[in-house]
Amino acid sequence: MGILDFLSGEFIDVIHWTDDTRDTMVWRFERYGHEIKYGAKLTVREGQAAVFIHEGQLADVFSPGMYMLETNNMPIMTKLQHWDHGFQSPFKSEIYFVNTTRFNDNKWGTKNPVMLRDPEFGPTRIRAFGTYSVKVSDAALFMQEIVGTDGEFTSDEITFQIRNIIVQEASRVMAGSGIPVLDMAANTADMGKIISTEVSKTLSEYGMIIPELYIENISLPPAVEEVLDKRTSMGVVGDLGKYTQFAAAEAMSAAAANPGAGGNGMGAGIGMGMGMAMANQMGQAMNPQGYGQQPQPGPWGAPTGHATHQPGGQPGYAPAHHAAPPPPPPPPAEKLWHVAANGATDGPFSKARMGRMVHEGSLTRDSMVWTAGQDGWLKAGDIPELAQLFTILPPPPPPGV
């Protein structure tokens, strides 16, 4: 092999780049000191751009395709080197391959809450986060403004700066949109497009764009969310008065069905109260107009209703047009007591049962008792409600009896 064949073998004649990573944005073609052969083949694949740097200056940029590196395919470098049309000597140049595909699934989010004036809640704070895609739109400008001489530039080196720009524009768009916080979830797609457009205006100075930006979630501070949940619960309940009556009725039904848990006296009282309430409702349903009832005397002794005649000749009285009296409130729930003795607790007991225990001697003033809402165990004699049980005991029998 001659010396010319050896030298020609030292020159690079095929230039290309295949990338198997997910984050490499720019890669420099390593020459290892070899010169590039005039007429070498350059392959630029789809999603790539090749940038030639000659003697520190950006020379030619090649889009996807296959090129023969000759004077007619390198106009800028030919002008810089003053090459003739028949020039065929090897040359030295740095070649950078730029990945122009989209880099997806990049995260963004607000570190601190964004202050805004909500039309419904007034001044409030929100947080937002999501994902975005970024791509190189101008390989030459990207090399000049961002990469420089970095031989292997990855997306991690620029994402921090991009996130700061996104958070700034997202805060401005959300605060100035005038959309209530409760309606922002329905407008995240439109706001994402607006934010990506505004961010792309800034990134265009670096040779980049944001083709997609998604807002995955917009949230309120935990304290505000807790209050909002309570407000939502009230909306689900509806009429709070009816709900209270329903809850009281359910509690009474449960206590009447399990009299042992609340004492026989409590269960009987609740059952009697429920029976009276049901009888009253049935009476009103069977005689809604008050026919057949005796008139009630008015303030001057006159009946409050006027005489009428029912079918069959029976006299009756029509009720006076007065507002119906309000229904009686539900009976108050009786306290249930627990007693601690010998390292164990016993109960619950009603107040009536506690009175019998005092009479039997199993409950004294020093006995430790507890009920719902009480701050720890207390002596029975220190609780006014139970202290009455000890004061109504009969005195001891007289001597000799």
Image: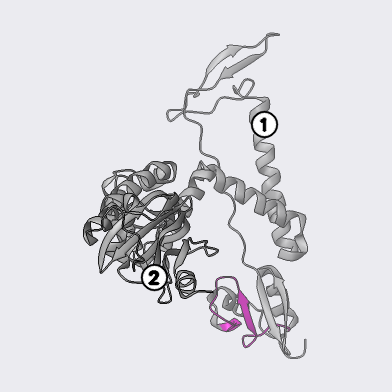
Q: Nearer the viewer, mark 1 or mark 2?
A: 2
Please say if 378 is above or below 90: below
The quadrant of the picture occupied by the C terminus is: bottom right
Amino acid on which disc 2 is placed = Glu
Q: Is residue 375 magenta-colored?
A: yes
By what rule are the colours in the image chosen? one colour
User: Seen from this angle, which residue lies furthest top?
Assistant: 312
Task: Determine the secondary structure under disc 2.
Answer: loop
Residue span colored magenta: 362-381
Amino acid on which disc 1 is placed = Gly
Residue 367 spot, x, y in % from top left: 65, 86
Q: Is residue 121 visible?
A: no
Residue 256 spot, x, y in % from top left: 73, 54
* Residue at position x 43%, y 72% in the image: 30
- The residue where tag 2 is placed is 35
Q: Quadrant of residue 108?
A: bottom left
* Residue at position x 38%, y 41% in the image: 190
* Residue at position x 67%, y 43% in the image: 276
The quadrant of the picture occupied by the N terminus is: bottom right
Q: Which mark is residue 283?
A: 1
Disc 1 packing (10 Å; few <14; some 14–19; many ≥20):
few
Q: Is residue 264 magenta-colored?
A: no
Task: Determine the secondary structure under disc 1.
Answer: helix
Side of 334 where 185 appears, left or right: left
Please say if 136 is above or below 322: below
